[in-house]
Amino acid sequence: MIKLRIAIQMDPLNKLHHESDSSLILAKEAQNRGHKIFIYEPKDLTLIDNQLFANVSSLKIEKKNKYTFKKGKCCIINLSSINVLLIRQDPPFNINYITATYLLEHLSPKTLIINNPKSIRNAPEKLHVTHFKNLTPPTLISQDEIEIKKFIKKHKSLIVKPLYEKGGKGIFKITLSEKNLDKKIKNTLKKEKLPIVIQKYIPQVRQGDKRIILLDGNPVGIMKRIPTKNEIRANLSRGGRAEKTAFSTKDKFICKKLKPWLKKEGIFFSGIDIIGNYLTEINVTSPTGIVEINNLENIKIEKKFWNLVEKKLTTYLKNL
């Protein structure tokens, strides 16, 4: 395989959790293979006469007990000169995030973008699961107080989520018997200024949820995230604990059902969340969990990732 030029659209290095960041382990493996790494933030993009440029820095990574970085001088490059571009900045999935996906559509078709920016834009994780009705728990997305109250009355115990946040931010449980229910609904709607997600509470979350990593539509790793005491969010960023687990028959069924859509939409790298027998999220913006799953399973997902990308790139260029 030729040595690749790889750009990573990501958050600032000093904002990453170095011990567990999936972007860093992917970048380090690419570097180990002799590929050249450039990094930039969405604010560094510039479109000139339909050509997309970025103010990038080259990156060299060392890892002993912790990561150390050597960044090159900033320079402007035409992103169509890049072989592979990884979109890896975290949500919130806001208008800035969406604008970056529009800009990236100007790249040469010779640049493989992971994931397809149009599909990222069209499939925010808490929204797109609603297209898989038979796999998901009863779900309402609305900012209509009357409809929200009717849904709460029907299901009695529910989870409320902001549409476009990450890491469990803003998620809480609500019940029909709760005091000040009306006030809580009004305050949430006032704060979000958007429709909110209300989903039937799945009691099995107390035993943890499952995060599954999929590459090119196929599951390659799984872990269970166990919430702390008195917490309904199992996210590791909320104190959840990663534990080894196995694929259930239902997990495999859900993955199989998602594969055709993931392939069709060019979503090469995704992470899905499953509670009990229900699919609750499809993460396509910047999936995480590689480091934890590697440690639990004694595997190297980053190697599988680049093996598949290198193979895919060869086929991709032949078909242009």
Image (cartoon, rainbow, N blue to C red):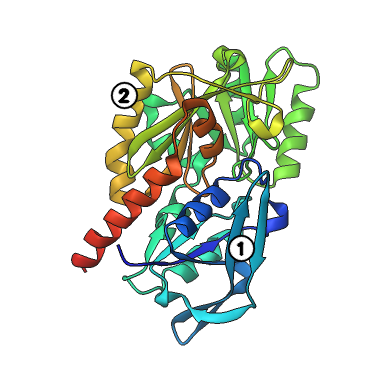
Q: Position of residue 156 (x, y in %)?
A: 61, 14
Q: Residue at x 64, y 58 (%)?
A: 11
Residue type at numbered disc 2: Phe
The mark tally for this picture is: 2
Q: Nearer the observer, disc 1 or disc 2?
A: 2
Mark 1 or mark 2: name the one nearer the start of the chain.
1
Q: Nearer the viewer, residue 9 or 181?
A: 9
As helix, strand or loop, the secondary structure at mark 1 comes to helix
Quadrant of the frame with the N terminus? bottom left
Q: Is residue 304 left or right of residue 73?
A: left
Instruction: Give the quarter of the image for residue 100.
Output: bottom right
As helix, strand or loop, the secondary structure at mark 2 comes to helix
Quadrant of the frame with the C terminus? bottom left
Count neighbours of disc 1 (C-alpha within 10 A) and say few if under 14, some if 14 to 19, many if 20 or more.
few
Mark 1 to mark 2 CA distance (whole Å)? 35 Å
Residue 149 visible in the snapshot:
no
Q: Position of residue 225 (x, y in %)?
A: 58, 24
Q: Is residue 181 above or below residue 93?
A: above
Residue 205 visible in the snapshot:
yes
Say the numbered circle drawn on residue 125. Answer: none
Give the residue furthest to the bottom: 49
Q: Is residue 307 left or right of residue 104?
A: left
Q: Look at mark 1 in the image and give the residue it sits on.
A: 96
Q: Position of residue 107 (x, y in %)?
A: 40, 73
Q: Look at mark 2 in the image and give the residue it sits on.
A: 253
